Image (cartoon, coloured by chain):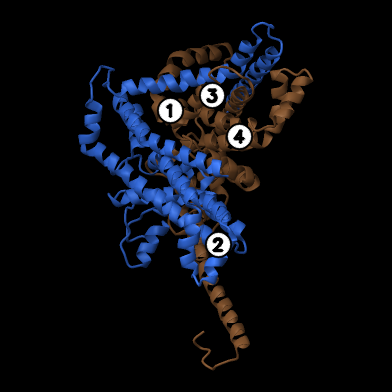
Chain colours: A brown, B blue
Amino acid sequence: MSQVAVPTPPVERGQVEAKAGRVKKRMTSRIASMIALVIAVLWTIPTFGLFLSSFREPDLIESTGWWTLFQNPGFSLQNYQEVLLSGSSSAPQLGEYFINSLFIAIPATLFPLALAAMAAYAFAWIKFRGSSTLFVLVFALQIVPLQLALIPLLQMTVTFLHPVMRSISDVIPIIPDQQYLPVWIAHTIFALPLATFLLHNFISEIPRDVIEAARVDGAGHGQIFLKVVLPLAMPALASVAIFQFLWVWNDLLVALVFSSGTPDTAPLTQRLAELAGSRGQSWARLTAGAFVSLVVPLIVFFSLQRYFVRGLLAGSAKG
Amino acid sequence: MTSLDLMGKALQFATGIVAFVAVFGLILFFLDRSAKGRKDFIQLALFLGPAMLLLAIGLIYPAVRTSFMAFTGRTGEFVGMDNFVWMFTQPLALITLWNTVLWVLLVPAISTAVGLVYAVLIDKSRGEKYFKMLVFMPMAISFVGASIIWRFMYAYRSPAQEQYGLVNQIIVWLGGVPQQILQNSPWNTFALIVVMIWIQTGFAMVVMSAAIKGVPAEQHEAAELDGASPVQRFFNVTIPGIKGSIVVVVTTITIATLKVFDIVRTMTAGNFDTSVVANEMYTQAFRAGEPGRGAALALILFLMVTPIVVYNIRVLRKQREIR
């Protein structure tokens, strides 16, 4: 504005000022965009570097930086082949662990979701004495970090669950005596307080008329729950399910404590942590391995973003 | 993996699902067919029973037992306050506590600040959606995956060789000597904290972004007419307008930070003076054969988390009431 030294008629001055203001605004917005871009790049580079490296030839990964890609070209799918398909006993054999992750995460999502939905329905639509006290208790259990339950729960698993698993294995020999069962149960228990609370928020807000109408038609609680409440609660169920699935898929602590740690039951995270921790770690394996474990969460993230964000915001204090 | 192994696993999976669906179906079947007289009680028991039983056996009882365990030694004998004395006097245990304090001071503050600034900068800009996606993505990744990503960033090679870890390469470009970033105490703890900040910033940004859009546009216009610069408007209009959300974000990230385990476990396993309470709890209870000390650490974790969770819930409630 100081450049406008010549006195000008008021109307024009107004225009000039507006123009100067616009220039200034564009300047600030350009600086803002620059800073935002820098942050975005900073936040993306670590993942990008690992992703790029996972497709480089193994000996190149550990001799040159991935940013020297053009000076040292050389791409291959060898790393992925090695971590997924190689059968040698020293190889990561991630295919097996990938299946474990899937076979752990699906039941460990379904079980608590169903149990929590039923409990939420009871708290919302069945009148009984002490209902609100009990609900507050369940709600309050969220403050218990799972660390506080781990040791006794593991002892109980060894005392009660291991004999059961052994006899299952005796009856059906192709099922090993190391099974998913303890991991499923542990995840189910730890998910219940939050899932019950979140689903209750939603289920209790279903209009009373809808429930009453079904009751007048002669439906009992079982039918109302199955045919009225569950379909109406789908968006909430989806959010909680996605959150819980990712939580289980990404979990390390519960897996370390309750899985056998062997290829029988250990999930991807546990295997990767093991590979990263072992002496003489190989980045050819780790880069590709990390991406094998990231594929599923990233697919969920990009395809179900709306539910993902909602579920994450609701459950971010879990654990 | 042999096909027999795979069959065994698939069978377990299928049996688990089928058994669960069968139980679930049976419960619903009996719900509407229970005897008339005691119908209400039976219905309630069927609906609530399974979840309440699991919580009582799997969470409440173990939590109470752990609390007692905190006062016992290696073989379960009563040792009074010994485990807590150990925690607050042994140099290694003290480092663990101090590191936890450091994490809690730095992670929530920096993630929230960066997340907020970023949310303001990209607000209503072209491609806002994609800008958000880039910073939010680490939130989808497991802590283990994030740790591997950052270990690669921190990778070290002797100065004579070409670096392949980006951080050390930048140090070299700036004329420095490559460092064993994850082993040099006390700086290694900061290197781990960076990972948590990297993950949590996306969460802060998404919540902040939603809150900013809730600040009335008239307030901004009025401030603009009064000649307030964008920076002034940020401090005098935006921040007061989203105070509630800032509190929620800071407390939520604080809780997550107090419980951080995977990052420390995967990056250093708590070696080189980087341990935190949640990691030490695991190490003591499941690796060192000291369940008493592990239980004591879990109890301390519980005591640290509780007030923040309660506060967080109260703020959330108040916000919901206002809306």
Image side of residue A188 versus residue A65, left or right: right
- The location of residue B221, given as percent across then percent down, is 57, 66
The kind of residue on which mark 4 rests is Ala
Q: Which residue is mark 4?
A: A241
Distance from Cα at disc 2 to Cα at disc 3: 41 Å
Q: Which residue is mark 1?
A: A257
Distance from Cα at disc 2 to Cα at disc 1: 53 Å
Which one is nearer the viewer's eye here, A202 or B185? A202
Image: A142 above or below B25? below
Q: Residue at x 40, y 23 (%)?
A: B63
Is disc 1 in the same subunit as disc 4? yes
Is disc 2 in the same subunit as disc 1? no
**Dot label at residue B219:** 2
Image: A194 above or below A37? above
Q: Which residue is mark 3?
A: A132
Is disc 4 in the same subunit as disc 3? yes
What residue occupies the far right of the structure in this picture? A217
